Image (spheres, grey):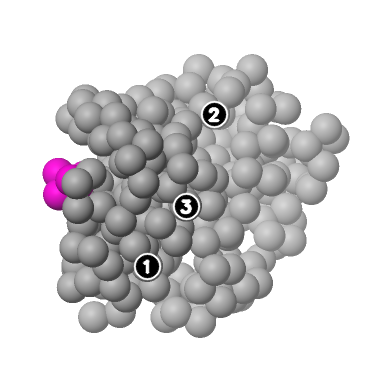
């Protein structure tokens, strides 16, 4: 599913009307013709107006425009268009309360490169801003409830790019539980499947208390696995949601790799 397959951002269009457009053979914005669309005159005009503006915004790569226009449950539709520049991120902390716990490491994966920032070394607000700057789409797992509030509480930082939190679309395709359980279910491997968030806290304290560089190295590796695996998970999610939506109506292939093949 690509942005230009989507009509739900237009006023008056919900999933049912969007599906009727696909079923009538109107699969993309450029195919939209109000004279043959199964819509009333006023709704057709609103869609036509949206399409005219959206085509320009897409040409400009204006991800924030679409982040504002799409319903929160449909932000996954931005993924195919912005996959190559999407920023995958994950944090580790000393606890679950953003007001009392510290962020220890933050890893980012973008365009195949992974960077990890470490508390007491290079984890600063300026370094965080530089990582988030210019990202058209940020991708996390449970980041809306956990990672972003932690970062915004601990640093003078605002994460305002469109945010694809994979926990929610995973539930739509019956992938439930934590990130590690979902990875195991869909066949995504990691170097240390035995480690958990509780181990991440222990490893940080072991490093901070004893100067144990091996503990820090294991923690960083664990955190990096989280972000690098998010891309494979996002590919699976995008393909399955595509297959359940426009792919169930028309022969419109998904344009993300299939990690299962």
Is 215 positioned to the left or the right of 254 in the image? right
Residue that numbered label 3 is attached to: 14
Residue drawn at point x = 69 percent, y = 36 percent: 150
Image vertical order of residue 124 relative to residue 229, above or below: above
Residue that numbered label 1 is attached to: 245
Residue that numbered label 2 is attached to: 159
Determine whether label 3 and label 2 are within 8 Å by CB: no
Q: Would you say residue 91 sits in the magenta stretch?
A: no
Which numbered mark, 3 or 2, is in the foreground of this view? Answer: 3
Is the N terminus in the top left, top right, bottom left or bottom right quadrant?
bottom left
Q: Earlier along the polypeptide chain: callout 3 or callout 2?
A: 3
Q: CA distance from mark 1 to mark 3?
A: 13 Å
Inspect this view and state whether residue 80 appears. Answer: no
Is the C terminus in the top left, top right, bottom left or bottom right quadrant?
bottom left
Q: Earlier along the polypeptide chain: callout 1 or callout 3?
A: 3
Magenta stretch, overall SS = helix
Inspect this view and state whether residue 21 appears. Answer: yes
Image vertical order of residue 59 relative to residue 114, above or below: above
Determine whether label 2 and label 1 are within 8 Å by CB: no
Taking depth in this image into account, of 101 and 63 the one nearest to the observer is 63
Is 153 positioned to the left or the right of 128 in the image? right
Circle 1 packing at 10 Å, graded few (<14), some (14-19), many (20+), is some
Residue interval drawn in magenta: 29-33
Circle 2 packing at 10 Å, graded few (<14), some (14-19), many (20+), is some
Q: CA distance from mark 3 to mark 2?
A: 28 Å
> Residue 117: horizontal and vertical position, in percent?
51, 35
Which numbered mark, 1 or 3, is in the foreground of this view? Answer: 3
């Amino acid at each position: 599913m690509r942005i230009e397959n989507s009509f739900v951002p237009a006023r008056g269009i919900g999933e049912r009307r969007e599906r009727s457009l696909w079923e009538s053979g109107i699969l993309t914005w450029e195919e939209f013709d109000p004279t043959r669309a199964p819509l009333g005159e006023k709704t057709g005009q609103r869609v036509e107006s949206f399409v005219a503006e959206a085509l320009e915004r897409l040409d400009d790569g204006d991800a924030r425009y679409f982040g504002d226009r799409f319903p929160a449950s449909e932000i996954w539709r931005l993924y195919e268009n912005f996959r190559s520049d999407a920023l995958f991120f994950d944090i580790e902390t000393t606890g679950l309360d953003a007001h009392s716990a510290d962020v220890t490491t933050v890893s980012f994966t973008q365009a195949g490169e992974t960077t990890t920032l470490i508390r007491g070394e290079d984890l600063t607000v300026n370094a965080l801003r530089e990582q988030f700057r210019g990202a058209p789409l940020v991708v996390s797992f449970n980041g809306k409830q956990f990672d972003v509030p932690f970062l915004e509480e601990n640093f003078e930082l605002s994460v305002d790019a469109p945010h694809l939190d994979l926990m929610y679309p995973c539930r739509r395709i019956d992938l439930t539980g934590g990130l590690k359980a979902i990875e195991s279910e869909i066949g995504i491997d990691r170097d240390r499947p035995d480690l958990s968030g509780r181990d991440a806290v222990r490893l940080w304290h072991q490093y901070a208390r004893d100067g144990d560089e091996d503990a820090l190295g294991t923690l960083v590796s664990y955190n990096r696995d989280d972000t690098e695996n998010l891309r494979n998970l996002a590919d699976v999610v995008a393909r399955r949601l595509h297959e359940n939506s426009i792919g169930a109506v028309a022969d419109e292939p998904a344009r993300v790799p299939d990690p299962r093949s």
